[in-house]
Image (tube, rainbow, N blue to C red):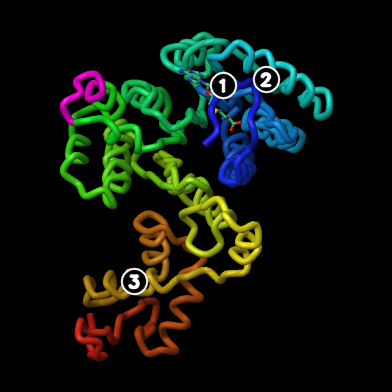
């Protein structure tokens, strides 16, 4: 895994996947938000140097490119608020942003960029307040190296500042179970990160379940902070270090657009990216079809809970908010389920007709 002992470092494949996800999401987010708001904010608490060893752009430069491009077609203004702790990285970032501005100038100066050398906490919030950015909808990327450096209080303040605010946090759970349960300082760090002590249950989990356990506690934390909907994208580097990107929003539209971005990066399951050990693996992955068999089971279970069936719109909304799948996957799947006689379609309603019992036999039922 890359660390910041140098000003710039190599871009890992999973970082490229994260950038693809970010670019895709911002390409949807920026025009939607700018069509309804005069000012929107893009902020980063761990901005990085803006470039990788191979010349690839860092996340602030990617964001600049998308936002400047969007402003050519939209009215309104964008504020970028970027905080970076390492002065060398901050200096590099200033140069990279200046280069991006000269190749894609900000239309009529409607993109204002503040780069601050400081710590994500408390400097990010102070900068957002100083620049008046808290009065506008913001997308806040908190992309540290994965350690628990983002205090829960920061999440809560971002959530409460504006109902359209969204966050995406990089979280590497291994740090939190590496230490012994009795390490007080370590527990205090975790408590500040999760905003409580629920996560202590990780010490009772088997090794194979610890990552998912902490992931779910962090989703709970985002809910408590005020982000009603969360999505998780899992990344594994070549050495199997686990990193989660956890997204929080209050808007179904945000969920929909982030899922679309996730399914572009992971065309098979929409939830993960693993650094390829074999360079050919990446090409193979791209050819795999989306696997919607879990969604088939989820929909059948859900249909069982409503004796009069469900509307297609309901099933699409349920899929959006309660599963990792996208609403656009529902109708093609329902057609296949009807061909397989798993559902009936009566006027305006979908009704489950059969399910496979635990013993593997098909039993008829009508929900
Ligand atoms: C993973 S890199 C960011 C990469 C960047 N988001 C990108 O995708 O191009 C994390 C950065 O956070 C910086 N950093 C580490 N601790 C920090 C802190 N407490 N506050 C702000 N920045 C910090 C590091 O110097 C490093 O540049």
Q: Which residue is mark 3?
A: 299
Residue at the (50%, 30%) spot, across then down: 143
Q: Is residue 51 visible?
A: yes
Task: Choose the circle earlier in sequence order: 1 or 2.
Answer: 1
Q: Is residue 146 left or right of residue 224?
A: right
Q: Quadrant of residue 33?
A: top right
Residue at the (57%, 69%) spot, across then down: 288
**Furthest residue in direction right, as rendered:** 103
Q: Which residue is mark 1?
A: 5
Image coords of residue 62 (percent x, y): 67, 34
Image coords of residue 124 (percent x, y): 48, 16
Please tell me whether residue 282 belongs to the stretch shown in magenta: no
Q: How many marks?
A: 3
Q: Is residue 89 left or right of residue 214?
A: right
Q: Which residue is mark 2?
A: 93
> Which label lies toward us, 2 or 3?
2
How packed mark 3 is, by other alpha carbons closer than 10 Å (few <14, some 14-19, many 20 or more), is many
Q: Is residue 75 visible?
A: no
Label 2, label 3: how far apart the Cα atoms are: 47 Å
Image coords of residue 95 (percent x, y): 74, 17
């Amino acid at each position: 895994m890359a660390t910041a002992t140098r000003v710039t470092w190599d871009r890992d494949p999973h970082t490229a996947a994260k950038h693809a996800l970010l670019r895709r999401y911002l390409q949807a987010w920026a025009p939607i938000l700018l069509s309804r708001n005069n000012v929107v904010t893009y902020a980063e608490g761990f901005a990085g140097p803006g470039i990788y060893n191979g010349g690839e752009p860092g996340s602030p430069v990617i964001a600049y490119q998308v936002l400047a491009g969007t402003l050519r077609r939209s009215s309104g203004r964008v504020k970028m608020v970027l905080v970076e702790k390492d002065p060398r990285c901050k200096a590099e970032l200033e140069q990279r942003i200046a280069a991006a501005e000269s190749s894609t100038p900000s239309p009529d100066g409607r993109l204002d960029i503040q780069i601050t050398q400081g710590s994500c906490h408390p400097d990010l919030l102070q900068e957002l307040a100083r620049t008046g950015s808290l009065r506008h909808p913001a997308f806040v990327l908190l992309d540290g190296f994965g350690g628990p450096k983002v205090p829960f209080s920061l999440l809560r303040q971002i959530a409460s500042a504006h109902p359209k605010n969204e966050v995406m946090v990089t979280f590497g759970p291994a740090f939190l179970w590496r230490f012994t349960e009795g390490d007080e300082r370590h527990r205090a760090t975790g408590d500040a990160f999760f905003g409580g002590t629920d996560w202590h249950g990780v010490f009772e989990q088997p090794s194979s379940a610890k990552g998912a356990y902490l992931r779910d506690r962090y989703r709970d934390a985002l809910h408590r902070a005020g982000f009603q909907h969360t999505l998780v994208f899992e990344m594994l580097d070549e050495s199997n270090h686990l990193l989660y990107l956890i997204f929080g929003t209050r808007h179904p539209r945000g969920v929909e657009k982030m899922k679309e971005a996730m399914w572009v990066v992971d065309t098979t399951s929409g939830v993960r990216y693993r650094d390829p050990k074999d360079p050919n693996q990446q090409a193979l992955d791209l050819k795999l079809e989306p696997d919607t068999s879990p969604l088939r089971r989820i929909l059948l279970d859900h249909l069982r809970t409503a004796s009069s069936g469900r509307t297609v719109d309901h099933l699409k909304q349920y899929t959006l908010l309660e599963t990792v799948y996208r609403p656009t996957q529902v109708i093609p799947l329902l057609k296949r389920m009807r061909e397989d006689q798993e559902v009936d379609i009566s006027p305006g309603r979908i009704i489950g007709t059969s399910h496979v019992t635990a013993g593997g036999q098909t039993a008829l039922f009508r929900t």
